[in-house]
Image: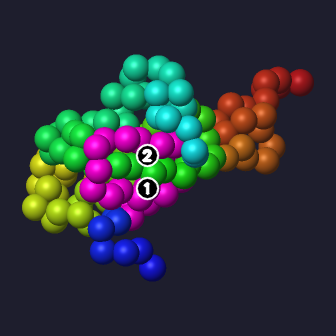
Amino acid sequence: MSNSNEFLGTGRRKTSVARVRISAGTGKIQVNGRTFEIYFPLESQRMAVQQPFVTTATSGKYDVSINVVGGGPVGQAGAVRHGIARALIEADAALRPLLKADGLLTRDPRMKERKKYGQPGARKRFQFSKR
């Protein structure tokens, strides 16, 4: 499926799914065909995306190609971070303890709760009146 110098990782957060492909290179990051600085304009999102590389001191060693769908910008940044961390483990299993210690391998399970019938939202109830 993938050639020997490419490593794949799938990251998820909320309703976002990121398919990450890393290969040895100079540190270029492309998200959905755009540079990642353009795709993630906020510094906090960029930091989240780069966190696995900072943690493992591998900044600038890999070129990253990402395809991300679903959710919003923050959820997508979290999904990309998860996918990069998983792809780095595929590339070098020795990095696992570092990534695990920083909590980058844990899939964030928090999602929007579904709306229930007989009430206006997930937990809110319609106004109660005795008569």
Q: Going by the image, does 17 lie left or right of 95?
A: right
Q: Is residue 23 visible?
A: yes
Secondary structure beneath dot 2 equals: helix
Quarter assignment of residue 86: bottom left
Q: Are marks 2 and 1 in contact (CB under 8 Å)?
A: yes
Res 80 label: 2
Q: Amino acid at mark 1?
A: Val
Q: Amino acid at mark 2?
A: Val
Quarter assignment of residue 126: top right
Foreground pick, 23 / 82 = 23
Res 20 label: 1
Q: Going by the image, does 117 lie left or right of 97?
A: right
Foreground pick, 32 / 25 = 25
Q: Is residue 42 above or below residue 21?
A: above
Q: How many neighbours does mark 1 have within 10 angstroms: few (below 14), some (14-19), or many (20 or more)?
A: many
Q: How many neighbours does mark 2 have within 10 angstroms: few (below 14), some (14-19), or many (20 or more)?
A: many
Q: Main secondary structure of the magenta part?
A: strand
Secondary structure beneath dot 1 equals: strand
Residue 47 in magenta stretch: no
Q: Going by the image, does 96 lie left or right of 106?
A: left
**Residue 59: percent from left, percent from top:** 22, 39
**Residue 7: percent from left, percent from top:** 34, 65
**Residue 11: percent from left, percent from top:** 43, 54
Q: Is residue 77 above or below residue 18?
A: above
Screen quadrant of the N terminus:
bottom left
Q: Going by the image, does 71 lie left or right of 52?
A: right
The residue mark sitting in front, 2 or 1, is 1
Give the magenta part as a residue range. 8-31
